[in-house]
Image (spheres, rainbow, N blue to C red):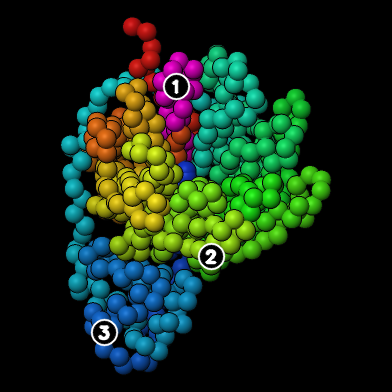
């Protein structure tokens, strides 16, 4: 579950709180939204609805009553998922989401529900030791940092990194490194081959970019970027989100063109021909906040000329807020394009939207988290076990929802049984604060491994020095596939915990897979982007 506050409203946060706020919207995806930050502008415990304000109802609070209330909106949260000290603020905050107030009002006394949870919750959560992961093996890496040529005085928050052939020069062994600075609205570009360039230049300035995808939207042979724009750095219910087309012109010039405006905070957008009419439609994940958001389709109307705001017709497919990712795929291999969405907030689910080839979709839940504080942070669609179908690689480790390390944080594989209708869950590795994972053959042994990165901000009851030293929380994992469907985690880094996003690819063209990490410069990182060059393909 995710939440955050807009720093422009209410009491101003402290400097330490600003550090947390800078990263609460990270996607990679990550987009993390924090209930902790929401406390800056939300009523504290003393102002929570109690017996005199919440309800005059006299319905006894029992386990059955609580389950009936909670399951109207999400899966039932067991008291054991949070410490007792968290339930007062959590229940008060939940009451501000869509529909909660109207469903609870007049049924039970809110204060009684709070006390019911407090009396049954543990004093603290038990965090399993991760010492079994604190060892490394091949491959070995050489780390280089990338800075921004046009320096900004404000901290940089990298929400998305990519390795793409944007300029069409891959025949010369050149790929572009693309990074999005969500805080300052920068689209950055750099190169690592054939010669190392340690600085990234500003390709364009947009609003608050969360994710981008490579696409030739106008069919002119030049590759463009499609950008999901949140519309604001702080979390608030508004319609300032945008879908922006970063159009490429000859000589490598780029101009931003807004294709859709007035949307709830847009976390992801992808282009695909969902109705098989020869043009590209857009599927949009609108994260929103408490009362806004959903999954949207922008149907291309077939108007002649360049794509524009008038070229698309908007339709909402799903009204749930919290959509982080949308990924087109023919999941059931019937020749009609579907897409998979990760929906966070209290919904915490992976949902497939099965297409009929005419822009009609049927929602099918592939995974439902066991409770609404799961902390979903990212998915990748990939055939992880090499059996010819599409699996789902998922991470849940958002610490921004309650500033805690939770024992169920980790990397998971949902194995497709073959027809896209059912998936078998596998827990691959525990990683506190995990925000992103991608699959690639890191050790050149013919199967796919996984690299996952973690981001951890402020924690309740744990200093950052303790986090980085005593707890030895890994921040970067190589999860090696040792045999088909069997995985062993290795910690590549056991400090910093400051990587909200990553991507994998052969950056230097030497035949092995490298790592590109995006960082938050407000925390411990010295540079917004790091390149981890894999040495396995190097000559002895």
Q: Picture coordinates of residue 343 (x, y %)?
A: 45, 58
Quarter of the view holding residue 45: bottom left
User: Marks 2 and 1: in contact by CB < 8 Å?
Assistant: no
Mark nearer the N terminus (1 vs 2): 1
Identify the residue at horizontal 65%, vertical 26% (top origin): 167
Please name the residue that numbered disc 1 is placed on: 144
User: Callout 1: 10 Å neighbours few (<14), some, many (20+)?
Assistant: some
The reply to whether residue 291 is visible in this rendering is: yes
Quarter of the view holding residue 504: top left
User: Callout 2: 10 Å neighbours few (<14), some, many (20+)?
Assistant: some
Q: Quadrant of the C terminus?
A: top left
Q: Residue furthest top?
A: 540
Judge whether residue 516 is colored magenta.
Answer: yes
Dot 2: what SS? strand
- Region rendered in magenta: 504-525
Dot 1: what SS? strand
Nearer to us of marks 1 and 2 is 2
Q: Residue furthest front?
A: 334
Q: Picture coordinates of residue 232 (x, y %)?
A: 60, 54
The reply to whether residue 463 is visible in this rendering is: no
Identify the residue at horizontal 51%, vertical 40% (top origin): 160
Please name the residue that numbered disc 2 is placed on: 318
Please name the residue that numbered disc 3 is placed on: 61
In this picture, residue 223 sits left or right of residue 352: right
Mark nearer the N terminus (2 vs 3): 3
Nearer to us of marks 2 and 3 is 2
Identify the residue at horizontal 46%, vertical 72% (top origin): 96
Q: Main secondary structure of the magenta part?
A: loop
Identify the residue at horizontal 75%, vertical 34% (top origin): 220
Foreground of the two, 384 or 539: 384
Task: Measure how far apart labels 2 and 3 are at the Cα level.
Answer: 33 Å
Mark nearer the N terminus (1 vs 3): 3
């Amino acid at each position: 579950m995710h939440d955050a506050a807009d720093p422009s409203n209410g009491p101003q946060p402290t400097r330490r709180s600003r550090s947390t706020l800078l990263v609460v919207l990270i996607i990679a995806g990550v987009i993390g939204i924090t209930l902790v930050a929401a406390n800056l502008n939300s009523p504290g415990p003393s102002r929570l609805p109690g017996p005199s304000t919440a309800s005059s109802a006299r319905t006894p609070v029992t386990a059955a009553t609580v389950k009936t209330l909670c399951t109207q909106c999400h899966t039932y949260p067991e008291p054991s998922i949070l410490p007792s000290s968290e339930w007062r603020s959590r229940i008060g905050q939940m009451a501000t989401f869509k529909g909660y107030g109207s469903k609870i009002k007049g049924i039970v006394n809110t204060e009684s529900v709070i006390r019911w949870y407090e009396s049954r919750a543990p004093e603290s959560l038990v965090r399993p030791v991760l010492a079994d992961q604190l060892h490394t093996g091949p491959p070995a890496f050489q780390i280089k940092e990338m800075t921004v040529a046009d320096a900004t005085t404000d901290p940089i928050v990298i929400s998305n990194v990519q390795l793409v052939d944007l300029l069409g020069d891959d025949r010369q062994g050149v790929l572009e490194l693309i990074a999005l600075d969500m805080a300052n609205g920068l689209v950055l570009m750099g190169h690592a081959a054939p010669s190392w360039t340690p600085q990234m230049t500003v390709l364009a300035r947009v609003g608050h970019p969360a994710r981008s995808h490579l696409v030739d939207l106008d069919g002119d042979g030049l590759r463009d970027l499609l950008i999901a724009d949140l519309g604001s750095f702080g979390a608030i219910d508004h319609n300032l989100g945008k879908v922006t087309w970063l159009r490429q012109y000859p000589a490598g010039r780029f101009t931003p063109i807004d294709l859709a405006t007035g949307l709830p905070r847009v976390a992801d957008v992808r282009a695909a021909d969902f109705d098989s009419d020869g043009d590209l439609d857009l599927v949009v994940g609108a994260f929103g906040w408490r009362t806004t958001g959903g999954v949207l389709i922008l149907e291309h109307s077939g108007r002649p000329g360049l794509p524009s705001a008038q070229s698309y017709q908007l339709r909402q497919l799903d009204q749930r807020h919290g959509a982080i990712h949308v990924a087109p795929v023919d999941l059931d291999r019937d020749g009609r394009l579907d897409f998979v969405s990760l929906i966070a907030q209290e919904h915490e689910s992976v949902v497939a939207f099965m297409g009929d080839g005419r822009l009609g979709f049927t929602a099918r839940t592939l995974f439902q988290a066991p409770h609404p504080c799961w902390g979903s942070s990212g998915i990748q669609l990939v055939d992880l076990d090499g059996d010819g179908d599409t699996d789902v690689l998922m991470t849940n480790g958002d610490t921004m929802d309650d500033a805690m390390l939770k024992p169920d944080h980790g990397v998971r594989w949902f194995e497709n049984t073959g027809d896209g209708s059912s998936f078998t869950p596998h827990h691959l590795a525990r990683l506190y604060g995990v925000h992103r994972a991608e699959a690639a053959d890191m050790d050149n042994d013919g199967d796919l491994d996984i690299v996952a990165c973690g981001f951890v901000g402020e924690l309740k009851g744990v200093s950052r020095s303790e986090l980085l030293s005593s707890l030895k929380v890994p921040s970067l994992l190589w999860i090696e596939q040792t045999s088909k469907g069997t995985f062993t985690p290795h910690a590549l880094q056991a400090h910093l915990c400051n990587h909200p996003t990553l991507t994998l690819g052969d950056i230097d063209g030497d035949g092995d897979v490298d790592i590109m990490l995006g960082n938050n410069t407000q925390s411990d990182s010295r540079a917004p982007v790091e390149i981890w060059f894999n040495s396995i393909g190097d000559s002895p």
